[in-house]
Each structure stands twice: as C-alpha cells, then as structure tokens.
C-alpha cells in the first residue's frame, strides 16, 4: 500500500477489517500481508474500492492457499 496516496478514510477497513485497520494516528495498518484464501475476495474488493488507488495486491498473493 502507498501511504502517500492513502487519505485514511477507512473504506478498506470497512470492507476487510481483518486485514486493514486505522491506528490512533489515522494511519492505515496492514494487519495481514498475506491474507488467507478465504479473505482474498474481500481484500480484492477493498483494493478495487479504494478511492485513492493506494492499495494493490502483490504478485503471488492470489496464487491460492499457502503451503502449510
Ligand atoms: S480505502 Fe484507500 S484511501 Fe481509504 S484508508 Fe484504505 S488505503 Fe487509505
């Protein structure tokens, strides 16, 4: 994510609170760099819903379930 673009409006944290949260200084924290497969749908939604285009998925993030 790009802190320079983020305006801390919390849209992503509303869509996927398990992965995105605003801290007390209104800075966005990414709680899970590699979210589990069951969260990826909402993470993708949050990325697409970010009005500032501050979020992106790393190549490989969508590769599917991680090896255990
Ligand atoms: S939706 Fe985008 S601009 Fe809003 S808090 Fe999340 S990353 Fe920042």
Image (cartoon, rainbow, N blue to C red):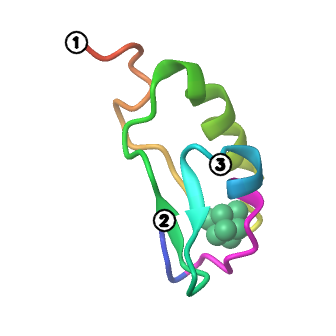
Task: Please tell me how crowded label 2 is: few (under 14), some (14-19), or many (20+) other residues with Cα within 10 Å.
Answer: some
**C-alpha gap between disc 2 and disc 1:** 25 Å
* Marks 2 and 1 in Cβ contact (< 8 Å): no
Q: Is residue 6 magenta?
A: yes
Quadrant in the picture for the C terminus: top left
**Predominant secondary structure in magenta?**
loop
Q: Which residues are magenta?
A: 5-12
Left or right: residue 60 compared with residue 41: left
Q: Say if 34 sits above or below 37 in the image.
A: below
Q: Earlier in the sequence, mark 2 or mark 1?
A: 2
Residue at numbered disc 1: 68
Which residue shows up at 31% across the image and 17% down it? 66
All told, the count of numbered labels is: 3
Q: Single out the residue that lies furthest toward the front.
A: 24
Q: Earlier in the sequence, mark 1 or mark 3?
A: 3
Q: Single out the residue that lies furthest toward the bottom.
A: 25
Q: Determine whether the residue tagged by mark 3 lies in a helix, strand or loop.
A: loop
**C-alpha gap between disc 1 and disc 3:** 24 Å
Q: Determine whether the residue tagged by mark 1 lies in a helix, strand or loop.
A: loop
Viewer-proximal residue among 46 and 60? 46
Which residue shows up at 38% across the image and 13% down it? 65
* Marks 1 and 3 in Cβ contact (< 8 Å): no
Which residue shows up at 59% across the image and 61% down it? 21
Dividing the picture into quadrants, the one containing residue 38 is top right
Which residue shows up at 72% across the image and 39% down it? 45
Q: Say if 65 sits above or below 39 in the image.
A: above
Dividing the picture into quadrants, the one containing residue 58 is top left
Residue at numbered disc 3: 17
Left or right: residue 38 compared with residue 36: right
Task: Please tell me how crowded label 1 is: few (under 14), some (14-19), or many (20+) other residues with Cα within 10 Å.
Answer: few
Residue at numbered disc 2: 29
Please state the quadrant of the image where ligand 1 appears: bottom right
């Amino acid at each position: 994510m790009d802190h320079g673009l983020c305006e801390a409006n919390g849209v992503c944290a509303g869509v996927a609170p398990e992965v995105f949260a605003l801290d007390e200084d209104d800075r966005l924290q990414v709680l899970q760099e590699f979210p589990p497969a069951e969260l990826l749908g909402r993470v993708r939604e949050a990325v697409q819903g970010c009005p500032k285009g501050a979020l992106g998925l790393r190549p490989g993030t969508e590769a599917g379930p991680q090896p255990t």
